[in-house]
Amino acid sequence: MRFGFVPLAQAMGAILAHSVALGDGRLRKGCILGPGEIGRLQAAGLTEVTVARLDAGDIAEDAAALAVARALVPNPVAAGLALRAVGTGRVNIHADVTGVLDLAADLVDALNAIDPMITLATVPRWQRLSRGDMAATVKIISYAVDGPALDAACDAGAGALRMRPVAMARAALIQTVTDADDGEKGHRAIQKRLSAMHVVMMPKCLVPHREAELAAALSAASDVDLILILTASATSDPQDVGPSALRRAGGQVLRFGMPVDPGNLLFLGQLGSVPVIGLPGCAKSPALNGADWVMERLICGVPVTSADIAAMGVGGLLKEIPQRGRLREAGPMNGED
């Protein structure tokens, strides 16, 4: 592609590189200069203009963006994604189902390394999306790109994106309580999270904050795809009430603790074939916490292992929440304000 100033006499059929204000209106960048446009530029007293002109083998920006998007998502229905061409060298890719975005980061990186003019930006892997939310955007920066470079980018990113739709239907929340706690705050917060993913939550279940009673409630939970435990006191050890009750009910604890803050005191387990999440106390707040990352993946049928949780530390320092009883920063140190 050739780019630069040319006399108006040589601009016929070229792409206008920059918008031009005229007495009778405006010529928008990206328009093809035909006789009418050239006449308007001449009438405004211009003698030259900045244009882009395609060479043989160049692919125009809109066609190139669409080619990349189709390579990323060759079967939109199967991938749960929708391609929306918006022009100016851009195609947005939206979720067509509620779920989490699965992407191959190495393929995205490889695509973006082919040619700086060919770009793909995505939300983070495993980001929860509702139907209609944007998952990624393809943008061709220049007015055209070299055909072989486009082919290489399409090959590099082939099949890199897909949604993992919601795969669970019903979840149970079991809360341990002390004194006169009605469990309503935790119930509302978790119900809101589950509703966003179209998962039905079973009626409120409250038991005393004791191992035996919690174990009995766990054993009684049936016809659910996921069990959530929210204890009256923070789970501070693998032998605490929540993990011990799960083992007593015949389940197993697969992981205690996670490198995400807020969310450190999560534990992950299994009761028969049903995943169990011991929620940290911060789950009573609507703010994002580490439990959301684990719960959303499991709800979408994505296995979560101890190693997966261990790998959540990069990016795991989340926003401080006002409801937090003990802030990360306790106060000034070494005389600092």
Image (cartoon, rainbow, N blue to C red):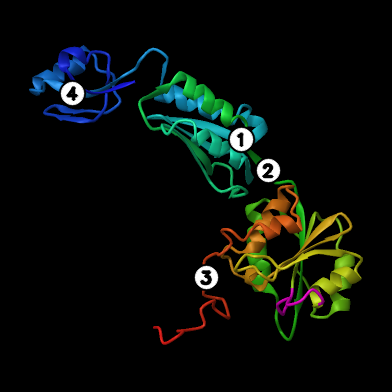
- Neighbours of disc 3 within 10 Å: few (<14), some (14-19), many (20+): some
**Residue bearing mark 1:** 160
Q: Is residue 189 visible?
A: yes
Query: Residue 165, labelled with which disc?
Result: 2
**Amino acid type for the residue under numbered disc 4:** Val
Please identify the quarter of the rendering in which residue 257 is found. bottom right
Q: Which residue is at a point 40% across and 25% down the rendered structure image?
A: 61
The tag earlier along the polypeptide, 2 or 1, is: 1
Foreground tag (3 vs 1): 1
Would residue 233 be counted in the magenta stretch? yes
The tag earlier along the polypeptide, 2 or 4, is: 4
The tag earlier along the polypeptide, 3 or 1, is: 1
Foreground tag (2 vs 4): 4
Q: Which residue is at a point 80% across and 54% down the rendered structure image?
A: 225
Please identify the quarter of the rendering in which residue 117 is found. top left
Label 1 element class: loop
Distance in Å between CA atoms under marks 3 and 2: 30 Å
